[in-house]
Image: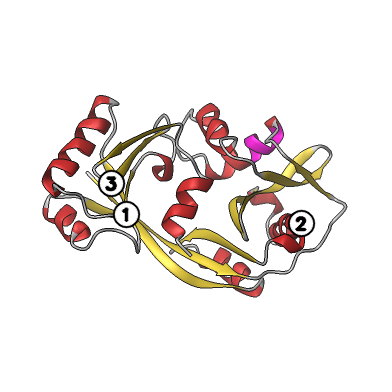
Amino acid sequence: MDFDRLVHEAWPAYEQRPHDGWVLRWAGGVTKRANSVLATSPPADLDGAIRAAEAFYGERGQRCVFSVGVGAPPGLDEELERRGYELVDPTLVMAGTPKGEHAREVRVEERPWPGWLETWWAVDGRYGSGLEEAGRICAGVPAWYAAYEEDGVPLAVGRAVPQGDTLGIYCMATLPEARRRGLARTVLRALVARAGEGSGSAYLVVTAGNTGAQALYRSEGFEIAGRYHYRVR
């Protein structure tokens, strides 16, 4: 699977500018994934392409970020390192054929609702006041939003994006006080069940340092299938 492209399509920047075979992505500065260069082919002019990217993000008051995955042009990572770009957020792509399980207590909707967004942002909101931009990114493609709720409050949430014969799992988050209750597993299985038999495989991304989440995903049938990281200056 072309994970670079799948992740790009499942987490869409609302501003995208093509340049010499690359895509310069912008979404209000919220998440590196939607505010980085997708470089999956060798440009005709590498120096010119890097300078164009730096100008694009500089105009928006943001540091220049490159997403460097398995499809990155040969030599790009080394050239960025030579120019002083820092390697950050090494990330694993995990894929498999997990089993779904319909759970009555899991709410699943086709759009994120305020409580879902608030719970996700409470866990993953590393970008200050960017909740509105984050919601806009989430709603940029058809997806399902799941939450385990108690007294109307989502304690664990997740997002699934149907992409042909595979399913992208995103935004898995559980409030700290609700952890170690198996709620993330319940949400994950509900999302897979929502996809039904039409989706035989699924994938997700998880930071390399999050070993607890990786253990959960392995127990649900996911294995490491790829890696990527970011270069930032």
Disc 2: which residue: 190
Q: As rendered, which of 6 and 186 lies closer to the eye?
A: 6
Disc 1/disc 2 C-alpha distance (Å): 33 Å
**Of discs 3 and 2, which sits in the foreground?**
3
The amino acid marked with disc number 2 is Ala
Report whether residue 34 is seen: yes
Disc 3: which residue: 21
Disc 1/disc 3 C-alpha distance (Å): 7 Å
Q: As rendered, which of 126 and 26 lies closer to the eye?
A: 26
The image quarter in which residue 58 lies: top left
Whichever of labels 3 and 2 marks the residue nearer the N terminus, that label is: 3
C-beta proximity under 8 Å, tags 1 and 3: yes
Q: Residue 157's spot in the image, x, y percent?
A: 68, 48
Binning the other alpha carbons within 10 Å of mark 3 as few (below 14), some (14 to 19) or many (20 upward) gives some
The residue at 29%/58% (across/down) is 72
Label 2: state its secondary structure.
helix
The residue at 80%/63% (across/down) is 101
Please identify the residue farthest to the right as the structure is shown.
Answer: 104
Using the image, tell me which numbered label, if any, was put on residue 40: 1
Q: Is residue 114 above or below residue 144?
A: above
Report whether residue 182 is seen: no
Whichever of labels 1 and 2 marks the residue nearer the N terminus, that label is: 1
Left or right: 76 in relation to 18: left
Q: Residue 119's spot in the image, x, y percent?
A: 65, 40
Q: Which residues are magenta?
A: 115-119
The residue at 23%/52% (across/down) is 86
Magenta-drawn stretch, dominant element (helix, strand or loop): helix
